[in-house]
Amino acid sequence: MINAGELRKGLTFEWDGDVWEVIDFQHVKPGKGAAFVRSKIKSVLTGGIRDTTFNPSEKFEKVVIENKEMQYLYSDGELYYFMDQESYEQIPLEKDMVEDALNFIKENDMATINFYKGKAFRVTPPNFVELEVTQTEPGVKGDTSSGGSKPATVETGFTLNVPLFINTGDMIRIDTRDGEYMSRV
């Protein structure tokens, strides 16, 4: 059991019939009245976000989330198959669960899958990936000193802004947490 006063970013707990992850929190001690904890929490099962306040003495059941490194194998059009590297067990996941991760992973790439009570609920790509640019406009000569950017599409179909010197066929490093260009490889 944990108190609301012990909430921290990334902590998972059970409350109101659902499992929640703390996205943001703030301990508030007003000049008048009792202290409280203002928090932004996200349901790990449905993905819904909720702003709420708790009394610091409220108690919650702490939840253990299991993380497994798994390899993305293939898609049959409806389901996406991932394989456990230790047991070689394959699990099928639906598109809405893996949609964001598919912007950054290709077949045979590794991803982290979160489980709660044996049920997968989230797929997270590695923090940094290296992908090939499949389509971008050529940079205009003399325009590179302005530090501008242009859209580019990588091999997974994801589109992001890159510097003007990046060309089709270049390998680039992308930060998957915010989808930003990092460097040319």
Image (spheres, helix red, strand yellow):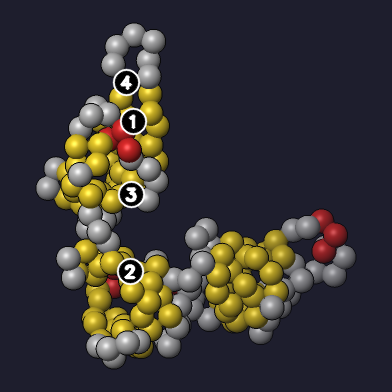
Q: Amino acid at mark 1?
A: Arg
Quarter in which the N terminus is drawn: top left
Q: Earlier in the sequence, mark 2 or mark 3?
A: 3
Residue hosting label 4: 35
Total marks in image: 4
Q: Quadrant of residue 77?
A: bottom left
Residue shown at 19%/69% (left/top)? 119
Q: Rate crowding at label 4 as few (under 14), some (14 to 19) or many (20 or more) other CA atoms within 10 Å.
A: some
Residue picked out by circle 2: 67
What element does badge 4 sit on? Answer: loop
Q: Are marks 1 and 3 in contact (CB under 8 Å)?
A: no
Query: Relative to 59, is 65 on the left or the right?
Result: right
Cα–Cα gap, marks 4 and 2: 35 Å
Distance of label 1 from label 3 (alpha carbons): 15 Å
Q: Amino acid at mark 2?
A: Asn
Q: Earlier in the sequence, mark 4 or mark 3?
A: 3
Residue contact at pointers 2 and 3, CB within 8 angstroms:
no
Q: Which is nearer the eye, 5 or 140? A: 5
Q: Nearer the viewer, mark 1 or mark 3?
A: 3
- Mark closest to the chain's N terminus, 1 or 2: 1
* Mark toward the start of the polypeptide (1 vs 3): 3
Percent across and percent down for residue 65 are: 27, 61
Q: Is residue 102 left or right of residue 77?
A: right
Q: Which residue is mark 1?
A: 38
Q: Secondary structure at mark 3?
A: loop
Query: Considering the numbered disc 2 on the image, is that residue within a helix, a strand or a loop?
Result: strand
Q: Residues within 10 Å of mark 1 (few under 14, many from 20)?
A: some
Q: Is residue 172 above or below residue 55?
A: below
Foreground of the two, 52 or 77: 52
The residue beneath circle 3 is 11
Q: Secondary structure at mark 1?
A: strand
